[in-house]
Amino acid sequence: MYRFGLLLVAVPLALVGCGGSEQAAPEVSAAQLTQLKDRAQAFAGQSVEQLAGNAEAMALAGELVEGHCASCHAKASASSGIPDLRTAMFNFGNSADAIRETIVNGRQNVMPAFGRTLGESDIGAMAQYLRTLGDTEAASGFAKTAIDLYEENCVACHGAMGEGNPQIGIPNLADDYWQHGDNIIQLRMVITRGLDEACPPHGQALDAAQVELLTAYLSQR
C-alpha cells in the first residue's frame, strides 16, 4: 500500500505531504521561465552543498519552484493527493541523489486496489491497524484478523512494521505522514481504490543548473 498520506502524483515535480485547501497557482509566462533559466546559469557547476549555503541561489530556487511546480503543488491537500513540497516525506528518499532523479526522470508508483478482494469489514480492520504501525505496543495488541490481513496483503511491499522501502518508492506507514489523509474514511478509500500516481520527467525542460538549484532547495526543507 502506498502512503495514504504517497509520493507521487501526476505533477510537474512531485516529490513525493498534506497541504491546506486548494488555491490557484500564479501564472508564469514562457518569457519569465526563460528569464529564470538565464539567471540560473550564474550558479552553473556549483554543487548542491554550495547552492544550499547561498541565500541568493536559494531565493532563485524558490522562484523556480513557483515557476515549474506550483501549478500543481499549490493544490496540495489530502483530497488531491498532491504533496506539499514544504512538508512532504519523499517516498524515494530525501537525499539529493533521490530528489535529482525524480526531477530529471520522473517517478511512478502503483498500489493495487483491494476493493474487489477484501470485504468491507476486512478493509475497515486493516485501516484501523495501519494507524497503529508507529506504536509497537498498540500494533501487537491489535485484532489478529487485522494483523493477518496486513501480513497477507501488505508486508511484501511495506515490510513487517510498515517501514517501507525508499529504494523502490514504497512509503513508510509507521511514521506520522499520510499524504492522502489519516482518518479511517481516507485510509479505507485508498485501500479500496488503490493508487496509480506519477511524476513526469523534467530532464528535457530543465537544464543542469536549474536541476541542481531545485535539488538543493528541496534537500534542505
Image (tube, rainbow, N blue to C red):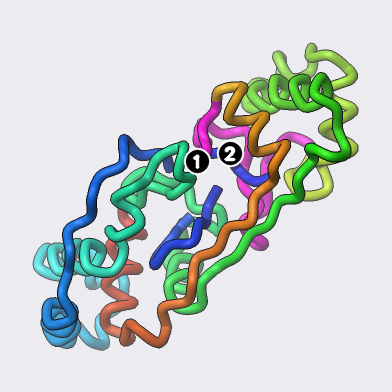
Who is closer to the viewer here, 59 or 36? 36
Q: Position of residue 191 (x, y in %)?
A: 71, 37
Q: Amino acid at mark 2?
A: Phe
Residue 159 to residue 137: above or below = below
Residue 42 in view of the camera = no
Answer yes or no: do the residues labelled 2 and 1 have beta carbons within 8 Å?
yes
**Which quadrant is home to the N terminus?**
top right
**Along the polypeptide, which appears first: circle 2 or circle 1?**
2
> Is 207 part of what is drawn in magenta?
no
Query: Which residues fall within the magenta stretch?
Result: 160-182
Q: Residue at x 71, y 51 (%)?
A: 111
Reading the image, the residue beneath label 1 is 179
Q: Residues within 10 Å of mark 2 (few under 14, many from 20)?
A: many
Mainly helix, strand or loop, the magenta region? loop
The quarter of the picture where residue 58 lies is bottom left
115 displayed left or right of 49: right
Residue 111 to residue 58: above or below = above
Residue 4's tag is 2
Q: Kindly state the secondary structure of the residue where label 2 is placed.
A: loop
Q: Residue at x 83, y 24 (%)?
A: 122
Who is closer to the viewer here, 137 or 67? 67
Q: Position of residue 25 (x, y in %)?
A: 23, 55
